[in-house]
Image (cartoon, helix red, strand yellow):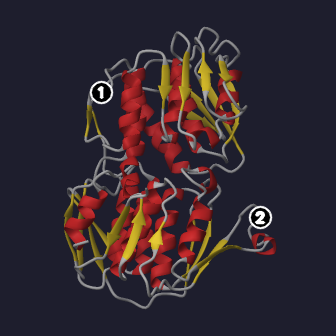
Amino acid sequence: MTDILQLRAESKDLVGTVPLDGSKSITNRALILLALAGAAPGALLEHRSTSKDSETLLRLLAQEGGSYDAGDAGTTFRFMTAYLATHSGTQELTGSARMRERPIGPLVTALRQLGASIDYLDNDGYPPLRIGSPEGLGAAGNTIAIDAGVSSQFLSALLMIGPMLPEGLRLQPQGNLVSRPYLEMTLRMMAYFGATYHWEGDTIVVAPGRYTARPFRVEADWSAASYWYSMAALAPGKVDLRLQGLFENSLQGDSILAEMMRFFGVETTFEADGIRLQRHEHILKPVFEWDFVECPDIAQTLAVVCAAKGVNGLFTGLETLSIKETDRITALKNELAKVGVSLSKMPAKFSRLQPGKQFFLIEGQAAWSEPPRFATYGDHRMAMAFAPLAFLGPIAVEDPAVVRKSYPQFWEHLGAYTGT
């Protein structure tokens, strides 16, 4: 039986201070880098994410051999694929039913070209995997070309093991580089722990060497902040909200929210220990246009904001959304339709204005007579993106526990600050 959470914001105002969890993306990279430096799992890491994904990675890093189960944690699976390729012995790496539908082929092919021993246990190109000893790793050379248009996590997984290879790594991203800020995050964190790298044109060159275990504090999660930005845009009353642990000079690409949400009247002030959100009423323009190629995780949030405000959304850069926890484009289309809003792919002739780009149009203003019941498709971001609609009226959200994947305290925080 599906659990259902009934929501309605009793408070018109959005006022207070929210202690956001640590960034999942930063935590997962730090856990791998510290493990490669020889630190005990979780050691030297402050304010790490308490998300299910990060806790899964921490558990796997503490495991000694056998079968590793990443569940539905995509980042964890990809990072562990490369990490285990550097370790002795033979291990199996598996995941949930949805994980076995998510492609891993480009990363496996690249690791094989570096000399790793990896076999598919079921369907070629997909989990589960058998990963053998690393004796040949690096023996076949150190130059790899990989499609950068599927997932930046493939590139990050390879880069993080680069210093462990006898001759380092020369990584050549091919095609359209999606989520580039996540790649830059990886490189900056590698440098913090002692790696040396540089760019030669479009090639990333990582020198051989060793990581040094150092204390590291994780900044708060900008992806989680996006749901509070959404609430700041939709709350009918006073907005004066502080989000702790977020900073202007962020490693996270989703920090673009501060610029993006000005369109909806939400202003960001950076303070010593975080940010302050306030809303200034102004006349909205009829169309919000954005390329999400560098921040795909907040596309769902902005789609719902557009729907709630009755602003047409013209979105591009959504190439990776269909291979996330669910097909997020289809999921958005289905759930927005429940409140009278359409999401449609623009005709090919429209894309010719910007070759290589696929555009999606969001039209309509969210309204309902009976409380809509939103499915979440096993996707934490679907649950949290639609929750702010509770400021417009009663709604219901299926499988609310799914938020544990990235923001376990979300419903608790939502109730505390909105009265839901």
The residue that label 1 is drawn on is 214
Which quadrant of the structure image shows residue 78?
top right
Disc 2 marks which residue?
A: 355
Q: Categorize mark 2 by other alpha carbons within 10 Å: few (<14), some (14-19), many (20+).
A: few
* Residue at figure coordinates x 58%, y 21% from the top left: 168
| Amino acid on which the number 2 mark rests in the picture | Pro
Is residue 376 found left or right of 19 in the rendered image?
right
> Image check: 92 left or right of 272?
right
Decide which of 295, 269 is in the foreground and name it: 295
Residue at x-position 55% and y-position 56%: 294
Sequence-first disc among 1 and 2: 1
Quarter of the image for residue 17 reads bottom left
Q: Is residue 370 above or below residue 162?
A: below
Quadrant (top left/top right/bottom left/bottom right) for the C terminus: bottom left
Image quarter hosting the N terminus: bottom left
Of helix, strand and loop, which one carries label 2? loop
Q: Relative to residue 79, is residue 407 depicted above or below?
A: below
Give the residue at the far bottom of this rendering. Answer: 283
Q: Are marks 1 and 2 in contact (CB under 8 Å)?
A: no
Residue 329 placement: quadrant: bottom right
